[in-house]
Amino acid sequence: MDTDKDKLDALAMRAAQFTTGSALVKGLKKGLVDFFQQPKRILSTCFPVEMDDDSVRMFQGYRCIHSNILGPGKGGIRYHPEVSANEVGALATLMTWKCALIDVPFGGAKGGVACDVKQLSDGELRRITRRYISELGDNIGPYTDVPAPDLYTSEQTMAWIYDTYQALHPGRNNLAVVTGKPLDLGGSLGRSEATGRGCLVATNHFLELHPVAGSSGVNGLTVAVQGLGNVGGVAAELFRQAGARIIAVSDSSGAIMTSAKEGLNLDRVRGHKKETGSVVGTPHTRSITNDELLTLECDVLIPAALGNQICAGNAEKVRSRLIVEAANAPITPAADKILQSRGIPIIPDILANSGGVTVSYFEWVQNLEHKQWALDDVNRHLEEKMQFAVERVIGRWQGLGALPDGNGFAVDLRAAAMSLAIERLAKVSVERGIWP
Ligand code: NAD
């Protein structure tokens, strides 16, 4: 079988997921469907930047707001050679559904600059950022559109964004123009771990309400994590602390596994990665391929790296009992159907990895209130929001006739989650009179 056959670009994948979710929303008018499928606005800008060698290069930047029905746009800014209008459009759409589901008062947005960070100096990146943000002008702002970090942008980038915006709008509190800032510059405690922590909270609560392999929590379960970056690395550590056994992890160089009863020694794995740049070769582990990791027998599989990892070609071979989508779009729509028919539940990305945008929202609130919350308060509020969203999704899923494990599911969790998000946006669109 051609394993790549069903891999879709991000926009096509979101459109397919929207179609499945919207079919479950009663009375959704076709006009509203069309309205939700189109981004509200995509700004494209081409700008010159002076390089270190005194030459001048042109860069292409974008910022898309898919929807601002629920509030200001919210979404990351990425720096990557493949950034395009299509890509930011798809990712902005994802943000709309994520914010609607987790219930933060934001719409969906995303932006980026097409560039290769690895070929640029810090000075060049700073000048690109300043020029890009000046070009966006008042299209971003605390009450219009609030960026955050994404691929190859960091706290440092957010600090430059804040500083540029502040220079253009002096004399007022502008901290809430961007989230993911350094702690000393209005960042929130708990933001950098929030996505991984949210995965743990969502998984534990899901298992409490829908036990898998006889277990009502992650304690004692075996877990494989693809990608040991910001999200996967934090998730692996927090799942371990909660009593799970991490039996395999990977990075872009390959994967490792252990058959030791206690699971991988994550301190040793991190130490080896720090020393050599890769998890592969960590003492007392066995090397496997990333494909093998995805099909290992385990209780929970956490894809936390890239999109399109589980597709029609390998979905039949997946042997985990539950999948938690820490990454965005790691499972294709064709693979969704296969896993659904096999009765393997998937906690979908718009739920599983929404911890990041939730704590971004907390950062925005703290900035507007001139306050800094204690870490315990951030984590408690995160837990409440995630648990409530899990309950709503499971309630909808069961209400739509989810069948017991072993017989497949009539509806998958993604469709249930999407239908809730679409329903909310439809309701507010009508309430606001945006849609007659
Ligand atoms: P990151 O760059 O910190 O980590 C990515 C990890 O994936 C790295 O360990 C890298 O080595 C690994 N990787 C890359 N290619 C791989 C491959 N072919 N096989 C296995 N591993 C591979 O990124 P991140 O911030 O952890 O984001 C990971 C995913 O989570 C992305 O899909 C991102 O969109 C999504 N996400 C991140 C956040 C967040 O707060 N950072 C929030 C929501 C969603």
Image (cartoon, rainbow, N blue to C red):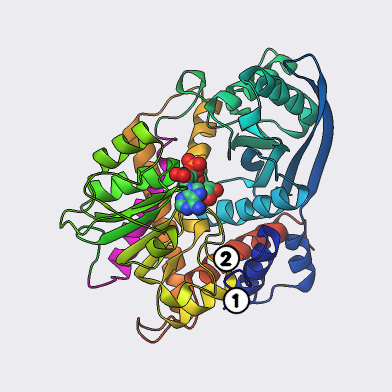
221 left or right, relative to 190: left
* Dot 2 alpha-carbon crowd within 10 angstroms: few under 14, some 14 to 19, many 20 or more: many
Determine which residue is flagged by label 1: 24
For the residues labelled 2 and 1, the Cα–Cα distance comes to: 9 Å
Q: Residue at x 82, y 21 (%)?
A: 56
> In the rendered image, which quarter is residue 424 located in?
bottom right
Residue 430 place in picture, x, y as percent: 72, 61
Q: Secondary structure at mark 2?
A: helix
Which circle's residue, 2 or 1, is located before the other in the chain? Answer: 1
Front residue of 332 and 388: 332
Determine which residue is flagged by label 2: 418
> In the rendered image, which quarter is residue 401 located in?
bottom left
Q: Quadrant of the C terminus?
A: bottom right
Disc 2 to disc 1: CB gap under 8 Å: yes
Q: Residue at x 48, y 70 (%)?
A: 413
Highlighted magenta segment, given as a residue range:
190-214
27 left or right, relative to 360: right
Q: Is residue 315 above or below residue 108?
A: below
318 left or right, relative to 218: right
Amino acid found under the numbered disc labelled 2: Met
Amino acid found under the numbered disc labelled 1: Leu
Front residue of 266 and 289: 289
- Residue 197 among magenta residues: yes
Query: Residue furthest toward the left?
Result: 261
Q: Is residue 48 above or below residue 432?
A: above
Residue 196 place in picture, x, y as percent: 40, 46
Front residue of 353 and 145: 353
